[in-house]
Structures are given as structure tokens and as C-alpha cells.
Image (spheres, rainbow, N blue to C red):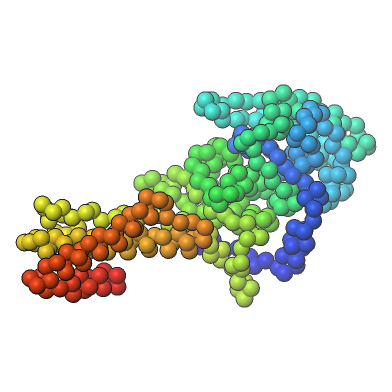
Amino acid sequence: MFVIETFKKEFFMKKEKNNKKDNKNRHLVQQSNALIETTQKMSLVERRLMYHVLSRINPKKPQQEYVLRVEDFAQDFPQMGSGTIYNQLKDAVVSLFKRSIQLLTERGTTKIFYLLQEQEYKDGEGYLRMKFSDSTMPLIFDLKEKFTTMVLENFKFLDSVHSLKLYELLYQYKSQGWREITVEDLRFFFGCEDTYPDFKLFKQKVIEPAMKEISEKSDLLVQAEYLRTGRFVTSVKFIFVEKTDRQIIDAECEFAEVKNLTKKQPLRPALKRHPNPRKFDLDDYKSAEPTSRREYIKLKFAWAVENYKRITGYEKALKEYDSKMTLKAKDQELKSNYVKIMAECYDEYLRYAFTWGGTGVLDEIKEDLTSK
């Protein structure tokens, strides 16, 4: 079980205070999902620079040029210090100008393009000018569908490019709360196609440190399930929740488990097959020897009770998982039918009570099945 450090009270007080601020004071980073799902071999400063720019532009008003003020950037990322920040940004802009991006298209092809078309700076002026390439523009401006909006304040203290990339990939699926990614795609997104060929090392050096840092320094708590095909891990299922929604930190422990992260949506149970009135050697009732209609009614009653038990158990599990969830209309109808069938079986037994000996045997069947 993955664990996270217990969060300090001061952090939550600050978080609560920040959540009360007007949204106008929050810097939103908006980008196309296609841009997120690219391989970008950027340095940490380059990534921070891009997040800063995306948080300051108006995505509804396309502008190909942006003037970056060093002072504004320093306010967004105070952990970088002020002494060498201009030189770091200048180097980052120069590198971004040369940086190509690989994007997987819907046709299954790989598109390669440059992020910037121009860059300009003057030492000592405190600003840098950047011009986005034509291919970049539709990925950050005038977005109408398939885009993700993140709050810069929620992830700006992440100190690893892998953590930042994973945060983006997960935040795309924030409403779902989980995302499954193949190992091959993870290597592509992280730019690690040629490094850490052994998955155990890839997991140890890239995946787990990224999850740990996201859980400690962002608004998400993350955990992973490693899914195998045969002997090999072929995909990773990331499960995550927002810290503002969780009430599960154990303040008495040095480390706290994110208990709800392993909580999965209940699966609909398989239902027993209806007993055949002509053949009683069904898989579910091999031990039963049908010698009369009485035996068939007993089997039919037991079938209805068992399936009613399964469907109502499933209904209860759905409610426990999410109070708003309920059975689908088809299952609601099945549930009602099982009640109807049980009543019909009772009537049948009452009809032949003199020779069949009353409904006591049905009561015993019901008690036996429902007690399991």
C-alpha cells in the first residue's frame, strides 16, 4: 500500500484560505489534451516557463507573441530564487526555440513540430519575447473541446519534470478519478523510450517518485495498480482523489494511508441460470435429482432467492460507493421479477399443501440462502 506523509495543519489552513479567494486571483493553465499527450523532453525550468505563459495568456484571444516579464515569473515560482533567474529563463527560452514536440495524431501517425517560431531577449532588460509556432497556436488558443484546465497554484511546487507530466496526464481524467496508461505510452509521455529498459527500474526511478511528489506537493493524492499480461506489467492504473475531498488523514500516525484510493466501483454480479423444467442437471444444481414438479418449484424458488440476494447486494454496494448511484432499469425490473417468482412458488406450494407438506421447505431454503 502506497503511503503519503501526514500533512501539516498549517498546509490545510493555507489551502482553505486560498480556496476562498476569488477565481480571478487564480492562474489557470489551459491546453489541448493533444498537447498534454505529447513527448516533450523539456527541462524543469522550460516546463515552468510554459506553465507560466499559459497561465497568463487569454485562451479566448489568440496572440502569437508573448512578452515574458521575469518579475512575474519569479512571483509564480518563488522557490527558484531571484539571483540567477533571468539567466535560467533566457537559457530556457533559447532551448524551447530549438525544442521539437512529438504528437500522436488520431490517424496513428507521429507529428513533429517546434513549439516556438521566434525568441528575442536583451540582457539586463528583465523581459523576453517569444512567438509561438503556427502548429502550437491551435493547441493553446480558442479551445472548444478536448482540453484541460489546471490551477497553477495547485502544482507549481512540483520539482520534477516527470511529476509535472504525470500530473497533467491524471488531471485530464479528474472527474473520473482514475486513468489507465500502457507502459509503452508512459515511456513515450515521459520521454523515456530509451532509458530504464527494465520496468522494475522504470517504476523505481520514474513512476513511484512522481506519484510520491504529486501526493506531497499538489492537490492530488495518487496511487497505482500495476496490471499484467502474463508475467509482464503492460499497463498502470493510476487512482487519485483531490485533497479537498478527502477526510481520511490519520493525524496520530507518522504516515497516513489513502484508504479510499483502493475503493473500486462495484461490478455487477453474475446471476444464476434459470432451472430448466425439462432438465434438472444444470451446472448450478447438479446434486439435485428432479423427480416431480415439487422439486422443480424448489429449484426455481432457490434460484429466485439467490439472484434477488445478489442483485440487492449489488444495489447496496453501489450506494456505499456513491450515494447517487442506483440499479439500472433492467436490474430494477429483474429485482421485482424475483420477488414475483418467489410469491408464485409459495402459491404453488399452498395449492398442493396437502401432498407437498406446506411451505416450510421454502422457508428453510430462503433462510439457508440469505444467511450465507
* Foreground of the two, 9 or 147: 147
Image quadrant assignment for residue 92: top right
Q: Quadrant of residue 89?
A: top right
Residue 227 visible? The answer is yes
Residue at figure coordinates x 76%, y 24% from the top left: 117
Residue furthest to the right: 124
Residue 95 picture location, percent across and down: 75, 33
Picture layout, residue 188 above or below residue 106: below
Q: Position of residue 8 (x, y in %)?
A: 71, 68
Q: Is residue 250 left or right of residue 159?
A: left
Asked if residue 212 can be seen in this view, the reply is: no
Counting labels gives: 0
Which residue is at 77% across, 50% downward?
A: 23
Q: Is residue 293 above or below residue 88?
A: below
State whether residue 230 is above or below residue 299.
above
User: For this rendering, which residue is in front, 287 or 41?
Assistant: 287
- Is the C terminus in the top left, top right, bottom left or bottom right quadrant? bottom left
Question: 46 or 279: nearer the eye?
Answer: 279
Q: Name the spot of residue 250 as percent of width and height, x first.
A: 60, 71
Question: Image check: 107 left or right of 71?
Answer: left
Q: Position of residue 193 (x, y in %)?
A: 54, 37
Choose between 357 and 205: the one closer to the eye.
Answer: 357
Residue at the spot 74% in from the left edge and 61% down from the top edge: 15
In the rendered image of this protein, does residue 169 appear above or below residue 136? below
Q: Is residue 322 left or right of residue 14?
A: left
Which residue occupies 52% across, 25% down? Answer: 107
